[in-house]
Image (cartoon, rainbow, N blue to C red):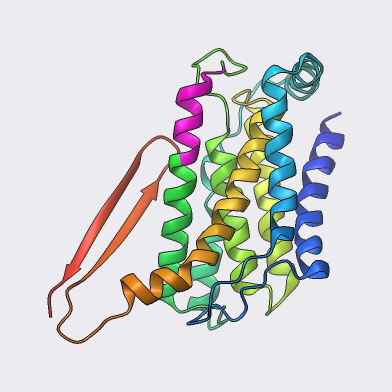
Amino acid sequence: MKSKLIALLLFLSVNTVFSQEVTKTDSIVPIKKEVLKFDYKALIIPSALMAYGIIGIESDGLKGFNANIREEVTEDIDDRFTVDDFSQYAPAVAVYGLNIFGIEGRNNFKDRTIIMGTSYLLMGTWVTVMKKTTRIERPDKSSFNSFPSGHTATAFACAEFLWQEYKDVSIWYGISGYAVAAGTGFFRIYNDKHWLTDVAMGAGIGILTTKIAYWVFPLMDKYIFTKKENQTTAMVAPFYNGKQLGAGILVNFN
């Protein structure tokens, strides 16, 4: 059963990447200084994942499936693996690491950082609000903030970030990022911290918020971050670590 769950998560991840490649859902190339263009097809996969998660809140059938998955995955487990605390950030770290080693992505350092920061702010806010409003108990009964999975949302937001930045260099960068994100989701279940519906909802939120960040970036770049003569500029650098949400502000006076 464990192998089936891993295969399912990897299938959803890889299918997301190939669906994006085949249907050309990301109609924001090139992103710099271009007019915002939205394509509804990009919403299909994250919306499906979130719909599954939301339906699972009240569906007895999906609740039963959650329980079965938990039982199969966690049985005979003696040790927990906290790799998910670190793997959630791995795809985003890879974006900057690849650039350091001379493999250029889609955007420069400033632009990609603004995009990732915007995604984190949206994702962190969304996850925090849903945790506080749904108050679903975790499988290990440690707290009532199980839905959705913040670790998974972070991982899939980062995976979509890696995909967007390096899909034109090699599709395999995107596939590896989504594989890591799927693994993070699996280990949230393995470590008895989340239900499958929590993970599905987190994955959908992560993918969608990064897409939104790329869609709105041209407008943000034009009206907020483009430096004009004798203009005071400010940059907001939001962060979310799975438990805390915050932001720093840098102001430049000309």
Q: Residue furthest bottom?
A: 229
Instruction: List x then y, in percent, for residue 205.
Output: 59, 44
Does the magenta run of residues contain 130? yes
Q: In this view, does 35 lie to the left or right of 252?
A: right
Q: What are the residue bounds of the magenta stretch?
A: 126-136
**Closer to us: 158 or 140:** 158
Residue 94 image position (x, y, % from top left): 55, 65
| Image quadrant occupied by the N terminus | top right
Q: Position of residue 30 (x, y in %)?
A: 59, 81
Classified by dominant secondary structure, the portion drawn in magenta counts as helix
Above-or-below relation of 22 to 44:
below
Task: Decide if residue 110 is in sight here.
Answer: no
The residue drawn where x is 74% and y is 51% is 44
Q: Residue at x 51, y 15 (%)?
A: 142
Residue 117 percent coordinates (x, y): 41, 58
Q: Which residue is drawn at 35% across and 53% down?
A: 238
